[in-house]
Amino acid sequence: MNKGTHFIGQPMYGQLLNLLDRSKILRFSRESGGERYVKHFDTWQHLVIMLYAVIKRFDSLREITDSMFPEARKLAHLGINLMPRRSTLSDANSRRKECVFEAVYRDLYATYRDELSSDSRRKRWEIELLFKQLKQNFPLRYFYGESANAINIQIWVTLIANLLLMVMQRRIKRSWSFSNLATMFRIMLMYYVNCYTFFEQPERDWLKIIEMDNPQPNEPALFD
């Protein structure tokens, strides 16, 4: 079976997560007591599932947990060792300190700041762009918990998702609006597609199919 020219052995979500440092995230969590008394659902898994939910724009814990079952094998390859129940995710959002996710965001911003901000004079414009992007692509219409801690975690995860997609946008040479890029990531998040080659030449597979279905006729010989 032809897997297409963009096939890669990692879902697009995994390629996005490659921008994160798992060991550093767990260290932030341990320093803040986020791993205390935790047996299975560590901060990495918590963050991966929350990012998944935010990018997919799910509106409830039920949507999050139910949607994970068809993607169980793919998520397992991304470090999800436990398919959490709604109560598990709800408890984590209530009890794990929001400062862990704030630390992740601030570290990411420091890591990719130079890549994202080439001109310090654009700082005010970039802040305005940030709020516009969040409103258009991560509207935060519904929260996954009622406590202040849960709400703040969701906000920090939304900022992390936005920053990761901004890095991707800068690394792709072809021009994509942020909204179109975010939409395509949402649709193709668990596809085994190389995000860089796809966003550079999204039409490549289609053109290949057309070429195979409509081969060029052989040039006639001189005396045919």
Image (cartoon, rainbow, N blue to C red):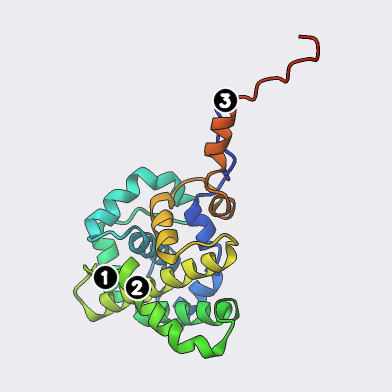
Q: Is residue 2 above or below residue 84?
A: above
**Residue 29 locus on image (x, y percent):** 45, 77
Per the image, label 3 sits on a secondary structure element best described as loop
| Pointer 1 residue | 140
Please name the residue that numbered disc 2 is placed on. Answer: 134
| Residue 56, position as x, y percentages in the image | 34, 57
- Residue extending farthest to the right is 222
Farthest front residue in view: 223
Badge 1 amino acid: Leu
Can residue 98 be seen in the rendering of this structure?
yes
Q: CA distance from mark 3 to mark 2?
A: 44 Å
- For the point 52% across and 77% down, the residue is 108
Left or right, 147 with respect to 78, comes to left
**Disc 1 on helix, strand or loop?**
loop
> Mark 1–mark 2 contact, CB under 8 Å?
yes
> How would you rate the neighbour count of disc 2 (Cα within 10 Å): few for under 14, some for 14-19, many for 20 or more?
some
Who is closer to the viewer here, 175 or 95? 175
Which kind of residue does numbered mark 3 sit on? Answer: Asn
> Which element type, helix, strand or loop, lies under badge 2?
helix
Q: How many marks?
A: 3
- Tell me: residue 221, above or below residue 78: above
* Snapshot quadrant of residue 94: bottom left
Tag 3 residue = 214
- Amino acid type indicated by mark 2: Leu
Q: Is residue 88 above or below residue 65?
A: below
Of the two numbered discs 1 and 2 in the rendering, the one whose residue sits closer to the viewer? 2
Q: Nearer the viewer, residue 50 or 39?
A: 50
N-terminal label among 3 and 2? 2
Horizontal and vertical percent for residue 160? 43, 72
Q: Residues within 10 Å of mark 1 (few under 14, many from 20)?
A: some
| Left or right: 90, with 22 as reference point | left
